[in-house]
Image (cartoon, rainbow, N blue to C red):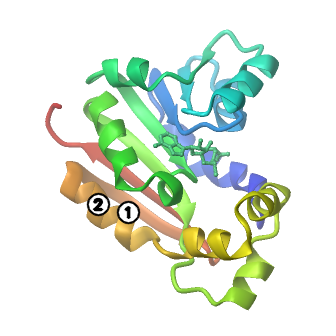
Amino acid sequence: MSGYWSLSTLVKRKVLPGLRSQHLDFGCGGGGWPHFLGRVNRRLKIVGYDPSVPKIQHARSFNKRPNVQFIYSPEIIRSCRDHFSSSTVFFVLHEAGDAALEEVRHTLSPGGLVYVLDYDIKGMGKAEFIDFFDSEQELEEVHQLGPEAAYRLHTSRGLEECVAAAERIGFRTLETDVFDEGYFIWAGQKIGRC
Ligand SMILES: C[S@@+](CC[C@H](N)C(=O)[O-])C[C@H]1O[C@@H](n2cnc3c(N)ncnc32)[C@H](O)[C@@H]1O
């Protein structure tokens, strides 16, 4: 399994069984994951949130699922205190940093679950990065950010930093896994209330 979208197999196996009735996909981008999750489990009520208005407009334009809705307002998300029973944070942490975990914790109900999926290529050399970072979506990021910024952004943190931040912020680690020589998944549970 390689490439960005083939991760769907791993998500089905590792993430889907843990998702609960009220689910937040934090930093959903153009809406691919909420749409996928909503299709494979029609009983979930899913909110896809991303602060990018064009991305949410795009997500809304193709969404036909009654159990999936898309939001771009940070104020609405911040008002959802202790609300969602599970959440996913896919390829957001390297961009948004630890603040994303703080926001997600705020929205989760006590005991709520979070699954973080991201790159685990801290310290990878430039030549290897060029070889690794080659899906259509990744190449688009290189185009938008420039090669040097894309390299720095994706190779400056990984699983270790995620675990340290999450446990400091108020999550307990349930599971970690590194796969495909470049990605990690971390599952955690919110400790306490907001
Ligand atoms: C690489 S994209 C990943 C999108 C999607 N989760 C996926 O896996 O296809 C990163 C997304 O994180 C979003 N993002 C960046 N900073 C954020 C923040 N502070 N809060 C929520 N989303 C954020 C961006 O707008 C972008 O859509």
**Mark 2 lies on residue:** 165
Amino acid type indicated by mark 2: Ala
| Residue under the image location 44 percent in, 27 percent down | 20
Q: Position of residue 53 (x, y in %)?
A: 64, 27
Ligand 1 is found in which quarter of the picture? Answer: top right
Q: Is residue 65 above or below residue 84?
A: above
Please indicate whether residue 86 sits to the left or right of residue 144 in the image: left
Whether pointer 1 and pointer 2 mark residues with C-beta atoms closer than 8 Å, the reply is: yes
Q: Residues within 10 Å of mark 2 (few under 14, many from 20)?
A: some
Q: Position of residue 163 (x, y in %)?
A: 33, 64
Residue 169 vs residue 58, the one in the foreground: 58
Residue 39 sits in quarter: top right
Q: Residue furthest left?
A: 192
Residue 145 vs residue 107, the one in the foreground: 145
Q: Position of residue 113 (x, y in %)?
A: 36, 39
Tell me if residue 80 can be seen: no
Q: Residue furthest right?
A: 136
Please indicate whether residue 153 sits to the left or right of residue 148 in the image: left
Q: Is residue 131 above or below residue 189?
A: below
Residue 76 sits in quarter: top left
Quadrant where the N terminus sits is: bottom right
**Mark 1 lies on residue:** 162
Quadrant where the C terminus sits is: top left
